[in-house]
Amino acid sequence: MILPLNLLEQYRDNVYELTCATIRRAYQITMTGDEELDENDGKVVSTAVHQILTKKVQYHIGE
């Protein structure tokens, strides 16, 4: 799995929020690691986007 383009094409919410959530999740994965990272050849951003789009990770953009 590289970048989940089919899920990204279907995404209809705020792209800015998706970007912010991806940045934050990628930082978390870098600091703590994740079991999906090995399956994705160490690609942190792709792993973060996939986890958000498949709803494995929930996000909330606060004020």
Image: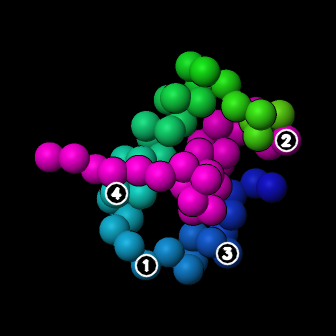
Q: Residue at x 34, y 68 (%)?
A: 14
Q: Residue at x 43, y 37 (%)?
A: 24
In the foreground, 35 or 22: 35
> Left of 3 or right of it: where is 61?
left
Residue 55 figure quarter: bottom right
Q: Amino acid at mark 3?
A: Asn
- How many numbered marks, from 0 up? 4
> Left of 28 or right of it: where is 34?
right
Q: Residue at x 85, y 41 (%)?
A: 39
Q: Secondary structure at mark 4?
A: helix
Disc 1 or 3, which lies upstream in sequence?
3
Disc 4 or 3, which lies upstream in sequence?
3
Disc 4 to disc 2, C-alpha distance? 26 Å
Q: How far from the left and from the top, in percent, is residue 15?
A: 38, 65
Disc 3 or 2, which lies upstream in sequence?
3
Disc 4 or 1, which lies upstream in sequence?
1
Question: Disc 3 designates what residue?
Answer: 6
Q: Which residues are magenta?
A: 39-63
In the foreground, 37 or 2: 37
> Left of 57 or right of it: where is 46?
right
Q: Secondary structure at mark 3?
A: helix
- Please tell me the numbered disc located at residue 39: 2
Disc 1 to disc 2, C-alpha distance? 27 Å
Question: Disc 1 designates what residue?
Answer: 12
Label 3 CA crowd tier, 10 Å (few <14, some 14–19, many 20+): few
Question: Disc 4 designates what residue?
Answer: 17
Q: Secondary structure at mark 2?
A: helix
Q: Residue at x 42, y 57 (%)?
A: 18
Q: Amino acid at mark 1?
A: Arg
